[in-house]
Image: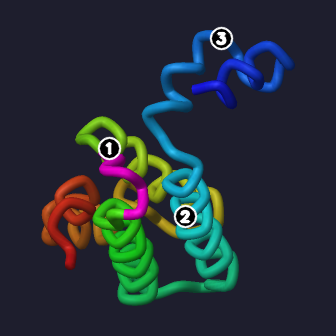
Amino acid sequence: MAEVARDVEAGILEPECAGAAEMYPESLLRTTDSALEAFEAEVRGLLEPTDDEILGAVERVVLALNAVDGDASHDGAGYCTEEREQLCEYIDLTLGEHGGRGCSGSEEGHRSCRDHGGLARLVTTVS
């Protein structure tokens, strides 16, 4: 709490974000960023990805995010439904930005994600 107050006073953290800083411990943010950075690097390396390669990359990041969410070292903090949906959107946008089709870029990609219950369901159920 004192660290958050110092960050607000120093201008490092906006006052309206102070509550969020307490909700999300640094360990959760750091490990989430690491999982997403690894996913981004993998996607950047896929030059002409097949649906299986795309779904494999998605599955790996989902498993990594589920491990982050289930890690007790974050003092009970984890992802709620809204945050899972935001992570799913980020995954889909990342695929689109790097030439992947994501879940909305093609009928085949959309069907593949739908067949797996959509990314939101995938994030909550892949283990």
Specify the principal SS of the magenta part.
Answer: loop
Question: Which quadrant of the figure has residue 83?
Answer: top left
Residue 29: where, in percent of width, then height?
A: 56, 51
On screen, residue 106 above or below 85: below
Instruction: Give the alpha-carbon distance from disc 2 to disc 1, as whole Å.
Output: 18 Å
- Amino acid at circle 3: Pro
Left or right of 99, for residue 12: right
Image depth: mark 3 or mark 1 in front: 3
* Nearest the eye: 4 or 69: 4
- Mark 2 residue element: helix
Taking the image as shown, residue 121 lies to the left or right of residue 72, namely left
Quick check: is 97 in the magenta stretch?
A: no
Q: Which residue is mark 2?
A: 31
Q: Which residue is mark 3?
A: 15
Give residue 39's quadrant in the image.
Answer: bottom right
**Earlier-in-chain disc, 2 versus 1:** 2
The residues tagged by marks 3 and 1 sit, at their Cα atoms, a distance apart of: 25 Å
Label number found at residue 85: 1
Q: Position of residue 72 (x, y in %)?
A: 33, 63
First in sequence, mark 3 or 2: give its number: 3
